[in-house]
Amino acid sequence: MIHATIDTFEEEVIKQKGLVLVDFWAQWCGPCQMIAPILAEIDEECPDVKVCKVDVDANMGLAQSYKVVAIPFLILFRDGEVQEKLTGLQSKKDLMDMIKKYKA
């Protein structure tokens, strides 16, 4: 799993081909801690999907540019374009269903 920053976001997410699931999170956020193992499983089980985490406290400008107002906030990109956004704790099934919907 990649930890992207405002400096690496374009390279790690925008310029990537295929699917990239980005988790905007914070250390102090309980639901963010709860979704972390689910994202780790997806990262391990889906080699064709890149999973990135963005710490909103360290990257406020990036969070603001994607209008993150609540966390966890997940954005699925395909070929650098936003496909779908989800706010709050999500089940693994819901995330996998979303990923399947956008696989090429």
Image: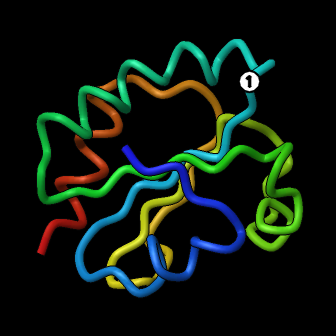
Q: Disc 1 marks which amino acid?
A: Gln
Tell me where residue 64 appears, x and y as whole percent: 86, 65
Residue at the image position 73 percent from the left and 36 percent from the top: 71
- Name the one closer to the observer, 78 or 57: 57
Residue at the image position 24 percent from the left and 66 percent from the top: 102
Image-based side of 80 in relation to 99, left or right = right
Residue at the image position 42 percent from the left and 70 percent from the top: 77
Q: Quadrant of the C terminus?
A: bottom left
Q: Quadrant of residue 6?
A: bottom right
Above or below residue 79? Residue 12 is above
Image-based side of 90 in relation to 1, left or right = right
State the SS at label 1.
loop
Q: Quadrant of residue 88?
A: top right
Query: Which residue, given by chain and number where applicable, does mark 1 sit on?
Result: 27
Image-based side of 98 in relation to 33, left or right = left
Local crowd size for mark 1, using a 10 Å CA cut-off: few (<14), some (14–19), many (≥20): few
Tell me where residue 53 appears, x and y as whole percent: 54, 46
Q: Quadrant of the N terminus?
A: top left
The number of discs equals: 1
Tell me where residue 7 appears, x and y as whole percent: 68, 74
Residue at the image position 36 percent from the left and 63 percent from the top: 20
Tell me where residue 78 appears, x and y as whole percent: 34, 76
Above or below residue 65? Residue 48 is above
